[in-house]
Structures are given as structure tokens and as C-alpha cells.
Amino acid sequence: MSRRVFLSALIVAIAVTASPATAQQRVWTETGEPVPGWEYVDDGVRDYMQTWAVPGAVLSLAAGGDLVFSRGYTWDTADAEVVKPDSLFRIASASKPITSVAIHQLIERGLLSYETRVVEVLDLQPPPGYPVDPRLEDVTIDHLLYHTGGWDRNETFDPMFVDGLIAASLGVDLPISKVDIAPYMTGQPLQFEPGDRYAYSNYGYCLLGMVIEEIPGRDYSEWVAENVFQPIGVGRPRRGHTAIHERAPGEVRYFGYGGDDPYRWNIENMDAHGGWILAAPDYVRLLSALFDDFDASPLLGRQSLENMVRVNTATSE
């Protein structure tokens, strides 16, 4: 069974914010323990951030399962919050590998298979008067994991970012939830036969998060925290929240490019595909636990890990 590589870097995690401060107003700050002989790494990060006006970043590296480098960098106004190595960042779509790990754990435990049809797990019902695309019956867990489920946002829209459209269509108030998004999408046609080709799908991973909640009957984030993060001694990751006043302790502040408001997105709905907040060292620890030694991972067996990183030959159009 061929699959798409979902991670391209196994030892580096970097997270950035963007602010409106001008270069003349900024000061440079480094946090974390310096590593003798690695000054060139600090210099490279500084050059990058100052060239592109990036105000905050963390770079963490691991080798042989050990964290060998973790530093925070701030290029912002003197009164700005200083980024530290353990600062929490929204990790956006880097949340998807976390969901993939959880799904593979359910598969290893015999509670799912790659061939399990999504409609066997989730009661997907469209709004009254909306037809269901018959191809939805053929969508499997495998299709969702590897973005071949039949949805192509380039041909239509990404349902995770059109809350107003969905609310108006369903006649419900904002903010909407996944309980609104899934029925709405169940009444929308697919763009291709499941399995025929690759098309990146946030919605597919939204459904995987719902599967994780349905199978063990637990909240998605609680189940992931217990089964993915706790076994490797990581306790800081959590689901992010939309509003700025709901930032977690130690979470950075975000600034949008070109006037975009980073706090307008419904982060709660993005849990399984883009809603986690993590510190870079914790993400690196997760990657090390998975891929340093396929025969000694505390999270998954060799076959699951090989499946997760095997290239999917389905092509996008």
C-alpha cells in the first residue's frame, strides 16, 4: 500500500510570528543555552529573521534521541514578549501528523483498519433536502490519511475556513462547530473518485479527528494527550483557541501579514488538522520517538511507521 510522505524534516521544528514593527524599532534577543561551535546557526536564524522581518522563532534539533540545540529568537520592539525555547506556538498543519499517529494507534489496536469506511464509523447525514454523493460510501480511513478522499478545495472551497457560508446555508448562528461542518459537507458533491488522486484536504483530517472521538468515545485532544504525548513525557501540548484573551500560558502572540487578523480563524474546529499549540522541543521529541528507531518507538510499531512515510503514488491534478 503506497502512501504519501507526511514529514520532510525529523529533527527540526521552527515556529514564527509576524508583527508590524519596522526594522528601525526592533532589537535582537536570543534565549536558551548557547551551544559552543554552533554560533553559525544563531547567525543564520538572525539573518533570516531580519531579512524577512520575522519577530519570533524557535529552533530545536535532536540527535540520537537527545535534544542538542534549542534556542528562542526575538526580533521585535524592546517591549515585546521575548520568545523562549519552550514558548508555545500554533503549529497549524503540523498538527496532522499528530492525528495520523493517533489513527495508526487505533489501527494497531484493531479498532480500525485502513479499509474501514468512514460512514461505518460516523453517522454522516446531510441537511434536509441535500442529496448525498454516492461516492462518499467508498471513502476509507486510508483515503483520509493520505488526502485522496475526493475533496479538492482548489476546485471548490476549504470548508474549514468558510464559517459564514456554512452558517448561512444551515440557518445557524456563528460560531459554528464541527457538528455543523460535517453535515454541510455531507450534502456537497465530491470532486473525484476516492483514491483516484491526491488533493490536500483539511476536511479529511477533521473527519479523522471525529473518528478518534467516536471510536474510544473520548474528546479528541484528551485522547491524543493520553496516548501520544504522555508516553513520551510531553505535557505542554494542547489545543489552541481562537480569541487572543484565551491564549495559553506561555503562548506567543500572533500578528497577521498585510492586515490579516490571525485571531479571526475558528481554531477550535481545526483541532485535528491545524489546532495544536506546541513548544518546538516537544515536537522534536515526538519526531524522535517516532522515527529515530523504527523498532523501538514507544508509540507505534515498525509497519505503521513504514506505512506513514511511504510515498503515495497518487498524483494531484
Image (tube, helix red, strand yellow):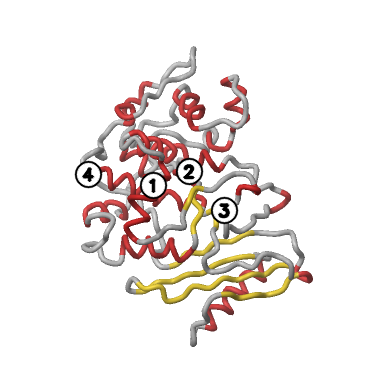
Q: Nearer the viewer, residue 255 or 133?
A: 255
Q: Disc 3 and disc 1: Cα gap in Å? A: 21 Å
Q: Would you call the spot at circle 2 few (<14 residues within 10 Å), some (14-19), or many (20 or more)?
A: many
Image coordinates of residue 85 in percent, x first then y, are: 53, 69
Tell me which amino acid carries mark 1. Answer: Thr
Tell me which amino acid carries mark 4. Answer: Arg
Disc 3 versus disc 1: nearer the observer? 3
Looking at the rendering, which quadrant does residue 83 occupy? bottom right
Task: Specify which label sits upstream in the sequence, 3 or 1.
Answer: 1
Disc 3 versus disc 2: nearer the observer? 3
Q: Secondary structure at mark 1?
A: helix
Residue 248 - label: 3
Tell me which amino acid carries mark 3. Answer: Ala
Q: Disc 4 and disc 1: Cα gap in Å? A: 16 Å
Tell me which amino acid carries mark 2. Answer: Asp
Q: Secondary structure at mark 2?
A: helix
Residue underneath mark 4: 109
Q: Disc 4 and disc 2: Cα gap in Å? A: 23 Å
Task: Specify which label sits upstream in the sequence, 3 or 4.
Answer: 4
Q: Disc 3 and disc 2: Cα gap in Å? A: 15 Å
Residue 99 - label: 1
Indicate whether 236 appears above or below 190: below
Image coordinates of residue 245 in percent, x first then y, are: 65, 48
Task: Specify which label sits upstream in the sequence, 4 or 1.
Answer: 1
Image coordinates of residue 240 in percent, x first then y, are: 54, 48
Residue underneath mark 2: 271
Task: Specify which label sits upstream in the sequence, 3 or 2.
Answer: 3
Q: Disc 1 and disc 2: Cα gap in Å? A: 9 Å
Disc 3 versus disc 4: nearer the observer? 3
Image coordinates of residue 89 in percent, x first then y, are: 55, 57
Disc 4 versus disc 1: nearer the observer? 4
